[in-house]
């Protein structure tokens, strides 16, 4: 039996904005015992605040703008090339606001995870908090799942429920769900990374 610890899985994170989930993953990956390390952050937007978070953590980041490519497959191919060059073995979507092509999802099959702000299979797509309130849900939450060709439908890794309160607004509910997303993503990435070692 080897006493050496398993090597950390090299991870790429795709973002489009604020990057609070990215921050949670950066913090977790800084722990010696955590089974993943972030080797590249890609943003499709140059002004994404998450890029500053990557820089502060000393993690390489690049902007690949979808506007620089004639179509989705070519944009996705540019991201795959950058991820491969960085040696990425597992990709995390963390507030990445572009739909991915089938080619990208196939290339990263069983290597691609996403966080979604609802208890899937409920409320796939956007505006999940508003729809949860309108539906009169008493429980809402977040899900981390493997990404498959069908939007927000791949196998679930982990979910975290959040109670809906009587006086909740879209913003108050979103804030409470987001607070749970961070720990949920950290735990789910650990599970995903360990499944690859
Ligand atoms: C989160 O609510 C996440 O579930 C959704 O987009 C949001 C990203 O937030 N996919 P942040 O950029 O991680 O702060």
Image (cartoon, rainbow, N blue to C red):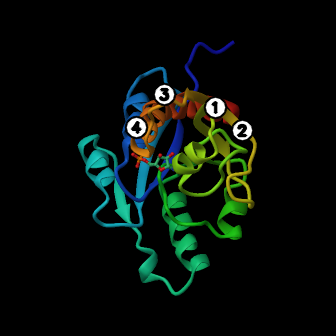
Mark toward the viewer: 2 or 4: 4
Q: Secondary structure at mark 2?
A: strand
Q: In percent of the image, x 28 and y 63: which residue is there?
A: 47
Q: CA distance from mark 3 to mark 1?
A: 10 Å
Residue topped by disc 1: 159
* Count of numbered circles on the image: 4
Q: In percent of the image, x 53 and y 35: which residue is there?
A: 185
The first of marks 3 and 1 along the sequence is 1
Looking at the picture, how far across and down is residue 46, in whole percent? 30, 66
Question: In this view of the protein, can residue 65 be seen by the observer?
Answer: yes
Q: Crowding near pointer 3: few (<14 within 10 Å), some, many (20+)?
A: some
Q: Which of these two is toward me, 145 or 139?
A: 139
Question: CB under 8 Å between callouts 2 and 4?
Answer: no
Q: Secondary structure at mark 4?
A: helix
Q: In percent of the image, x 49 and y 25: which residue is there?
A: 34
The first of marks 3 and 4 along the sequence is 4
As displayed, is residue 51 above or below residue 135?
below
Q: CA distance from mark 1 to mark 2?
A: 8 Å
Q: CA distance from mark 4 to mark 1?
A: 19 Å
Q: Secondary structure at mark 1?
A: strand
Q: Which of these two is toward me, 136 or 128?
A: 136
Residue topped by disc 2: 156
Residue topped by disc 3: 183
Q: Secondary structure at mark 3?
A: helix
The first of marks 4 and 1 along the sequence is 1
């Amino acid at each position: 039996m080897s006493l050496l610890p398993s090597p950390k899985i090299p991870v790429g994170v795709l973002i489009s904005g604020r990057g609070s989930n990215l921050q949670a993953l950066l913090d977790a990956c800084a722990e010696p015992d955590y089974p993943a390390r972030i080797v590249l952050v890609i943003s499709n937007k140059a002004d994404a605040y998450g890029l500053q978070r990557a820089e502060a953590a000393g993690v390489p980041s690049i902007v690949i703008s979808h506007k620089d490519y004639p179509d989705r497959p070519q944009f996705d191919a540019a991201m795959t090339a950058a991820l491969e060059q960085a040696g990425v073995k597992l990709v995390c979507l963390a507030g990445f606001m572009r739909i991915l092509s089938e080619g990208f999802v196939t290339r990263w099959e069983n290597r691609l995870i996403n966080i979604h702000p609802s208890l899937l299979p409920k409320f796939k797509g956007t505006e999940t908090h508003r729809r949860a309130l309108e539906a009169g849900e008493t429980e809402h939450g977040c899900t981390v799942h493997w990404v498959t060709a069908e939007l927000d439908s791949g196998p679930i890794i982990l979910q975290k429920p959040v109670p809906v309160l009587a006086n909740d607004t879209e913003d108050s509910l979103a804030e409470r769900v987001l607070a749970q997303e961070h720990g949920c993503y950290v735990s789910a990435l650990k599970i995903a990374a360990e499944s690859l070692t």
